[in-house]
Image (spheres, rainbow, N blue to C red):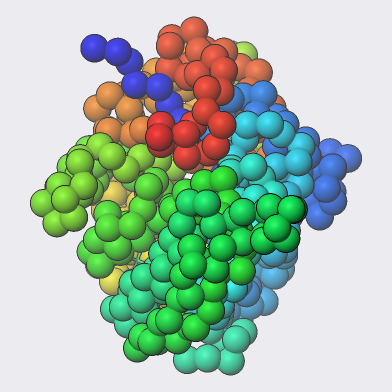
Amino acid sequence: MSKKQAHLLGFVQHGVNSHATGMWRHARDKINWNYAAPDYWIHMARTMERGFFDAMFIADELAPYNTHGGSSDPVIRYAVQFPVHEPSTIVPIVAGATRHLGVGVTLSTAFEHPYSMCRRLSSLDHLSGGRVAWNIVSSYSKSEWDAYGASMTDRSRRYERLEEYMALCYELWNSYEDGAIVADRASGIYADPSKIREVNFDGQFFRCRARHFVAPSPQGHPVLWQAGSSDTGRDFAARHAEAIFAVLPTVNRMRQYTEDLNNRLEHKFSRPPGSVKLIFGLQTVVGETRAEAEDKYERIKACIPAEGALAWMSGHFGLDFSRYDLDEYVQNIEVPGIQGLFESVVYAKDGAPVTLREAAMIYAQGMGMPVAVGTAKDIVDAMEVYMDEGGADGFMLAATYTPGCFEEFADLVTPELQRRGRLRGAYTGRTLRENLIGR
Ligand SMILES: Cc1cc2nc3c(=O)[nH]c(=O)nc-3n(C[C@H](O)[C@H](O)[C@H](O)COP(=O)(O)O)c2cc1C
């Protein structure tokens, strides 16, 4: 049987810090780089392409978290997902600097009409030559709703609305027939109106009467990406996604997740099991020797501020953890926020009790992802287990210090993956969908 090859995504935010809390103050972070300037993103993109990544993947939320102590002070104080600039603005920079690298962009459906969302994404698909993915989210944090002056709706209502959102997006994206753009200079006919359907949508949440404003883009629509993790969220992902991002702390949890998703695909949505790429979060700390890697890992952990760590958990999980006893076990707590990520701390020790104090430090390193620390050989050993036993089709590689962590990955881990036949030696597709999904 041929070995499964890994898909690689570089997981970042358009901000001073990504998903390892406190990294902005690490001695190796952004030496002579400004996260808010194009040069930094050009370098990050080229480094990921040099490492044969499928895409850069940009997470996002719409406002600083304000759950911890009822205020955004702690996340601002410790740069916990703050400041965060608008993610789609860097897509053309990344695409312009590379030939093959895709770019996944997280855009929330909560406060944007599907009509403008489709217009924006189709435009980005054109500008990138068909290398865009959309991480579909619906805003899970109260701070986002506060920022837009709206009351947060509950999860089931958000998913109901999201279903309708997608229905309208598909209508818009599928409204051009082949040959709709004629561009015949002699007759002066640019497009054939009979081949561009006017969408006439009258739903419970959205109304739209218009033709899609953007000509058909190279991929037709962006690669659809999802990370829903509740029961409804997993169904939504299984119905719509071409690739899924999940954080599972152990190989056992990965295996269970893979089985669950493939079951949903096959039995609920008549999609072949294995047809959706399962990309699992992974943080890597690589060194020339194990001792060097261990030392690096200690330095990374030393940057985490305890209050910032807890404030991040409050933001993601929708509870004010400043009011909790830090010796309480997370197994006894139910959260209204991101279910799947909370499970990453609940199962961090394979089900053994984890205190809130421990959970905050585990979570703050990289959202509860497994961390592979060691030489390139050690890291690829772990990746092979996650692929062969856990069902991973690839990895969302969470940034530590940047751009260094991706440079080190490209220099050390990429060649080891290639030596073992676990990573492409060249990009074979033209679009992100061709490279990532294989069609
Ligand atoms: C690994 C992972 C990454 C996520 N990244 C984001 C993100 O960048 N922005 C966002 O708004 N939501 C993000 N989410 C939230 C989900 O996409 C989803 O909206 C949220 O989990 C609520 O749905 P659920 O209750 O079904 O999980 C992420 C969730 C997971 C599990």
Asked whether residue 272 appears in the rendered view, the answer is yes
Farthest top residue in view: 419
Residue 129: % across, % down = 64, 42
Q: Could you say where residue 12 lies in the image, as x and y percent from the top left?
A: 61, 48
* Residue shown at the point (27%, 54%) measured from the top left: 238
Judged left or right of residue 369, residue 336 is left
Which one is nearer the viewer's eye here, 372 or 48?
Answer: 48
Q: Position of residue 284 (x, y in %)?
A: 53, 31
Task: Name the outermost residue toward the left.
Answer: 267
Image point 30% across, 13% down: which residue? 2
Q: Quadrant of the C terminus?
A: top left
Q: Is residue 359 above or below residue 431?
A: below
Name the residue furthest front. Answer: 187
Q: Is 436 in front, or is 179?
A: 179
Dividing the picture into quarters, in which one does residue 333 lie? bottom left
Above/below status of 164 relative to 47: below
Query: Which of the 4 quarters of the picture holds residue 235?
Result: bottom left
Q: Residue at x 56, y 23 (%)?
A: 427
Residue furthest right as drawn: 32
Q: Which quarter holds ligand 1?
A: bottom left
Position of the N terminus by quadrant = top left
Question: Along the horizontal axis of the image, is 389 left or right of 111?
Answer: left
Q: Nearer the viewer, residue 17 or 74?
A: 17
Counting every numbered tag in the picture gives 0
The image quadrant that residue 187 belongs to is: bottom right
Residue 154 appearing in the image: no
Residue 248 location (% of width, % of height): 34, 45
Q: Residue at x 57, y 17 (%)?
A: 426
